[in-house]
Each structure stands twice: as C-alpha cells, then as structure tokens.
Amino acid sequence: MEMIIKELKDELSYQVRLDAINKIKDYDLNDENYRSLKEIIIQLALSDRVFAVKQAAFLLCQKNKLKKDGEVINLGKKNTGYSPNDIRKIFLKIKRETKMEALDLDLFKEHFQKISPKMYDVMSYEHMYFDNWIRGIYKYLSK
C-alpha cells in the first residue's frame, strides 16, 4: 500500500497517478485500512491539475460515496491552475537562460521539465499536440 500512496502523490507524472488510481478502483475506501488512500483520493478529486486524474479520483469518490467535511464532492471545471501569464513567464525564462534565438524543441522541453516539472506534466497532458503548443507560444514571445 505504501507504493500506491507514493504513486498517488507523484506530482511529476500524471500517468503514474492515473495508473495508481486504476490499481485501487475496486478497493472499498470506506474500510479503515484504507483511510490514508481515502484522504489522498479526495484531495486528488478536489485539486489535481490534470483533469483526467481529477476525474478518475472523482469517479472513485462517487463509487465509494466519499465526502469532504460532510459535503458531497463535485468535479468542478477543468482548470490547470496556470494562467497564460504563468506560462509566458516560464517560456521567457527558458529562452533567456538557454540564450535560444531559434527554437530547439528538445532543448526547450528539457529545460521546461527542469524549471517547472509540475507545469510540464500538466501541459503535456492537456495539450494533445504538445510540441505544436510549445512552438505556437514560443513564436509569439517578445524578442
């Protein structure tokens, strides 16, 4: 169970969190033995920035009739928690630190993952064409 808890708390890989949720989908989270899992699942359902993880945790909460402070848990809107300005700042920082005039996608992604691993994880999921998304934003950064 410790391994599953570690996977559920992995903030740098949405896929690890999602796989961990799928591993416990048949558990009765109302059982006292799973108290720590229950708390983590509720937290993921309420605040994970990757919507697929949030939704999977929410469905698990619904299945187990879990509540937070006596209140039914709602899925809420899809929200990454990052504003366009947050993204722009990270992109400008990478451009400045790498002294990159023309986009080198591999180098950019490497630095993006180092500078803001959580944002990288969220955006790599949220944007189906992640490379094109990076190119599009980079193209319009100030010179």
Image: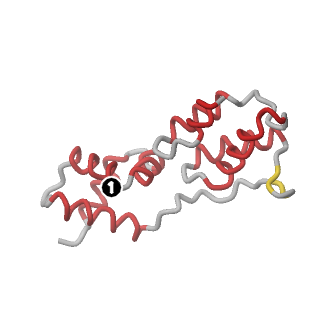
Residue 91 as seen in the image, left or right of residue 143: right
Q: Secondary structure at mark 1?
A: helix
Residue 31 as seen in the image, left or right of residue 108: right
Q: Residue at x 84, y 34 (%)?
A: 31
> In the image shown, does 101 or 17 lie closer to the viewer?
17
Alpha-carbon neighbours of circle 1 within 10 Å: few (<14), some, or many (≥20)? some
Give the amino acid at mark 1: Ile
Percent x, y for residue 85? Answer: 40, 71
Percent x, y for residue 140? Answer: 26, 67
Percent x, y for residue 32? Answer: 83, 36
Q: Quadrant of residue 9?
A: top right
Percent x, y for residue 105? Answer: 23, 47
Q: Residue at x 32, y 50 (%)?
A: 114
Number of numbered discs visible in the structure rendering: 1
Q: Residue at x 19, y 65 (%)?
A: 96
Q: Quadrant of residue 34?
A: top right
> In the image shown, does 88 or 3 lie closer to the viewer?
3
Residue 119 as seen in the image, left or right of residue 16: left
Q: Which residue is mark 1?
A: 115
